[in-house]
Amino acid sequence: MSPYQLRVHTLRSPESLATYENIWAKHIPGMAKHRITTHGVWTVPAAPASEAPQLYALVSYRDADDMRERLEAYVSSPEFRADMEGFDLTQIVDIAESVLTPTADSPLR
């Protein structure tokens, strides 16, 4: 069974969310080269005068792969550096990661 990971990226502003959404489109093929499959990417705009905008990504890893090892390989790759070029990393306020285990009846097994 493939391990899944829900990644939640909190951004500083709606503008940084829009820019980061375009960056994530570039991440998908680069991540695939490192055996990380992207199943979906969603945005949550900031609510007026409250929460920061967020980008959610659901990814999975091959059964035998170490998730941390795969992610570190991608983050240190030329593809990742090219994707992030010109983006101010301080626009990412937080990254939360949750490992998800599909239930027996889940379509994503």
Image (spheres, rainbow, N blue to C red):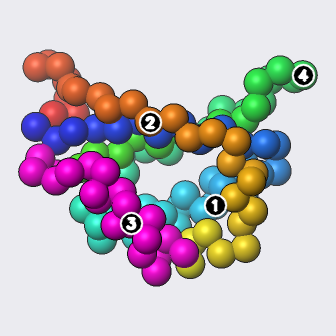
Q: Quadrant of residue 77?
A: bottom left
Residue furthest right as drawn:
49
List x then y, in percent, for residue 93.
70, 42
Cα distance in 3D space between marks 4 and 3: 35 Å
Alpha carbon of mark 1 to alpha carbon of mark 4: how far? 25 Å
Q: Nearer the viewer, residue 2 or 65?
A: 65
Residue 80 lies in the magenta-colored region: yes
Q: Which residue is mark 1?
A: 22
Q: Could you tell me which residue is drawn at 82 percent across and 43 percent down? A: 13
Of badges 2 and 4, nearer the viewer stands 2
Earlier residue among tags 2 and 1:
1
Residue at 32% across / 32% down in the picture? Answer: 99
Quarter where residue 69 is shown = bottom left
Residue occupying image coordinates x 53% and y 61%: 25
Closest to the camera, between mark 3 and mark 1, is 3
Going from N to C along the chain, the mark reached first, 3 or 2, is 3
Is there CB contact under 8 Å for labels 3 and 1?
no
Nearest to viewer (mark 2 / mark 1): 2
Residue 8 coordinates in the image, percent (x, y) = 53, 37
Is 70 colored magenta in this rendering? yes
Query: What is the number of the mark on residue 74?
Result: 3
Q: Earlier in the sequence, mark 3 or mark 1?
A: 1
